[in-house]
Image (cartoon, rainbow, N blue to C red):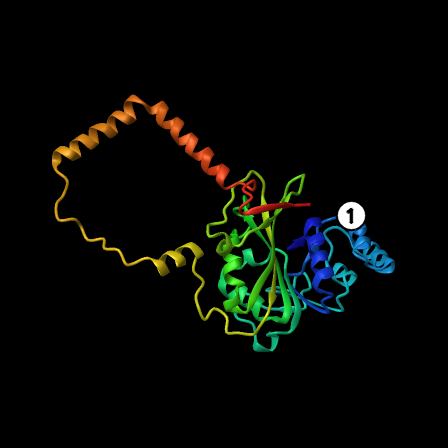
Amino acid sequence: MGILLEDAKNLLEVYVAEGPFQKVLTLGRQQIFFQPPELAPALKKAGVSADRITRFVSSTFDRGPADPLFEALGSSEIFSMDVSDYEGASIRHDLNQSVKSELHAQFDLVYDGGTLEHVFNFPIAIRNAMEMVKVGGFLVSVTPANNQAGHGFYQFSPELFYNVLSSSNGYAVEKMVAIEISPSHRQYLVANPTEVRGRVMFSNSWPVNLFVVAKREKNVSLFSQTPQQTDYAAIWEKSAPKSYLPTATAPSSDKISIKRRVKQASLTVAPGWIRFLTTFKRVFMDRQTEFRDSKFYRRIS
């Protein structure tokens, strides 16, 4: 669990817009995965005092604890939660199990810097994170979205977080950014599937993380309605039930024979043509699910 430079810059923007957050909980004992001087210009531009910047740069090191970062951003109480205390977490708890009610609505910010994908019982884990945020507070999560199979148990889609961190659960996603883990560190604002009326998908050549910022607007019973994928829910709501009973008459053996011969001919006579069509379809589908699709993604600096 660690904070990359691009994550830190996005977190800084959240603090400037919504913070400072006095009482913070990190899921897992977070580490810094960059050289502290790299963040100093952004801290200065954001108005962080010179003494705080100096203290952060002098007391923090790559692969070291991230607490000094949150202190530099103005947090006064910083807690961490982990199943083990091997990294010195202040609260020992297995996120596969529900947290005690004493921890509900206790934190101005709950920060997940790459923990949820490592927890097998994700519905319980995300509920825990959501429960521990105060009304008016924020949940910020950075999780793998693409090309990171094997990093954890899961990779996540924009649909999941927009659906879970929704008004029915007392939350609103204020910002979702797809961050390429690449030399250029390209970033894209991600559209809400409900608003664009379609699946927000992408395929690319680099690993991608989702940086999600969600505000807890009210205290309601979580998941009183089970989240359903947006496009399916819309179809179910509008469509009449369909009958899948077999037709009264089966196709004749002559028709079956003709179909079989046509299929066999297409596979034996023109395999090159079929491969071309398959390749064309794949290229076309990839173009529809790349970041260049401005309907779903907007490049940001």
Instruction: Looking at the picture, tell me which residue is in the foreground, 129 or 250.
Output: 250
- Residue drawn 67% across the image and 39% down it: 183
Disc 1: CA contacts within 10 A as few (<14), some (14-19) or many (>=20): few
Three-letter amino acid code at the position of disc 1: Glu
Q: Is residue 44 above or below residue 265?
A: below
Q: Residue 300 placed where, x, y %? A: 66, 46
Instruction: Looking at the picture, tell me which residue is in the foreground, 70 or 65.
Output: 70
Quarter of the image that includes the C terminus: top right
Quarter of the image that includes the N terminus: bottom right
Judged left or right of residue 193, residue 234 is: left
Q: Residue 19 placed where, x, y %? A: 72, 65
- Residue drawn 16% across the image and 48% down it: 247
Q: Is residue 59 above or below residue 25?
A: above
The residue positioned farthest toward the top in the image shown: 269
Q: Quadrant of residue 242?
A: bottom left
Instruction: Looking at the picture, tell me which residue is in the foreground, 123 or 295.
Output: 295
Q: Is residue 64 above or below residue 186?
A: below
The residue positioned farthest toward the bottom in the image shown: 102
Number of callouts in the render? 1
Q: Is residue 96 visible?
A: no
Residue marked by disc 1: 38
Secondary element under disc 1, as helix, strand or loop, is: helix
